[in-house]
Image (cartoon, coloured by chain):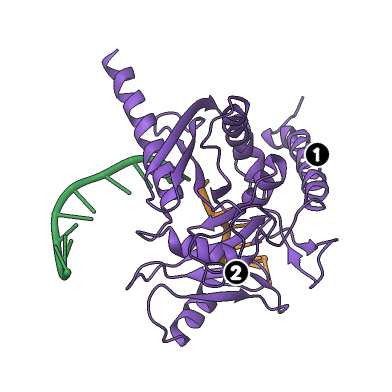
Chain colours: A purple, B orange, C green
DNA sequence: GCGACAG
DNA sequence: ATCTTGTCGC
């Protein structure tokens, strides 16, 4: 009889808390597979020590991927997942692919992967199945790696590493690829605030293109803040995703930054937007 | 209690 | 994520 609108809410919040719990469990299981150190067959082309070393057998890093998702302005549930692969040295785009879809999963802070990872993994899988020669040796992801609020100690790491499990980790583990997380905004974790980062960056009167470690209140290093361009006020936030060390990740990001955001991410972003925008243009003309 | 919360 | 113009500067 008397059934105020609020009466509907309990069942809804129970559903969402059930999903929430499922997500937490899934993250915890995947996190156990996370590798927080360099674990790949390639080498960096211009590494100082490796130039003379007799490791001619190892192949060099050549194919760097980037993934992103853009959304329709008309219908926020319509999205376009995008995968690009760039030549590491020339930063030219060698491959691109798009996938349109309607998202059913909402964006919940801390659980971005459950909304965005499926399409992106599908794009990677498609490329791998077709034995494309440009299949990435490393993937950069638009979103965080271990710089993520659901932190835990990694079960298998020598120097104890405290780690969350963001989108970049999620994709890395599921695709078994080395991944780097690139955040354009700071996700506040372990006492890391915008203010604190600004202060840390200000203290270092270093030259441009430099970075600071993101050390939380607990003393753990979650990633790095980097001013990728000279005079860039707004830093980007780098954290490891999977099978890479922070040191290596920073080096690679620096080498791929023509602008604030590293090229693989930037190209995925631009082309993804382009793709969905042109599609909407055609739809209006009918 | 209030604020913060990747994309 | 997306809505949005001009503007300052190399």
Q: Which residue is mark 2?
A: A247
> Do marks 2 and 1 both belong to one polypeptide chain?
yes
Image location (x, y in percent) of residue A68 = 49, 42
The C terminus of chain A, quarter of image: top left
Q: Residues within 10 Å of mark 1 (few under 14, many from 20)?
A: few
Return the disc, 2 or 1, that comes first in the chain's sequence: 1
x 43%, y 58%: residue: A256
Few, some or many C-alpha atoms within 10 Å of disc 2 (few <14, some 14-19, many ≥20)? some
Secondary-structure class at tag 2? helix
Q: How far across and down, in percent of the image, does residue A171 sit?
A: 65, 44
Residue A246, x across and y down, in percent: 62, 66
Q: Which residue is mark 1?
A: A18
Q: Residue at position x 65%, y 64% from top?
A: A245
Chain of the residue where label 2 is placed in the rendered structure: A
Numbered mark located on residue A241 in the image: none
Using the image, determine if residue A165 lies above or below residue A135. Answer: below
Relative horizontal placement of residue A153, taking residue A178 as reference (left or right): right
């Amino acid at each position: 009889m008397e059934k105020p609108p609020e009466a509907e809410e309990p069942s809804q919040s129970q559903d969402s808390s059930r999903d929430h719990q499922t997500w937490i469990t899934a993250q915890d299981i995947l996190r156990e597979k996370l590798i927080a150190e360099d674990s790949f067959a390639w080498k960096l082309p211009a590494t100082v020590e490796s130039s003379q070393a007799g490791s001619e057998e190892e192949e060099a890093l050549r194919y760097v991927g980037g993934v992103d998702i853009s959304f329709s302005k008309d219908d926020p549930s319509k999205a376009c997942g995008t995968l690009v692969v760039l030549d590491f040295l020339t930063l030219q785009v060698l491959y691109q692919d798009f996938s349109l879809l309607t998202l059913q999963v909402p964006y919940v802070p801390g659980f971005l992967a459950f909304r965005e990872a499926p399409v992106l993994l599908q794009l990677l899988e498609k490329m791998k199945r077709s034995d494309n020669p440009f299949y990435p040796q490393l993937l950069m992801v638009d979103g965080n790696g271990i710089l993520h609020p659901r932190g835990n100690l990694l079960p298998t790491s020598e120097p104890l590493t405290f780690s969350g499990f963001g989108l970049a980790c999620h994709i890395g583990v599921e695709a078994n690829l080395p991944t780097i997380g690139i955040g354009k905004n700071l996700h506040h974790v372990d006492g890391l605030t915008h203010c604190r980062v600004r202060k840390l960056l200000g203290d270092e009167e270093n030259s441009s293109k430099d970075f600071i470690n993101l050390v939380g209140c607990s003393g753990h290093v979650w990633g790095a803040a980097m001013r990728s361009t000279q005079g860039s006020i707004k830093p980007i936030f780098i954290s490891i995703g999977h099978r890479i060390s922070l040191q290596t990740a920073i080096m690679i990001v620096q080498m791929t930054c023509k602008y604030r955001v590293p090229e693989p991410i930037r190209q995925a972003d631009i082309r993804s937007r382009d793709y969905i925008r042109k599609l909407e243009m055609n739809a209006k003309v009918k």
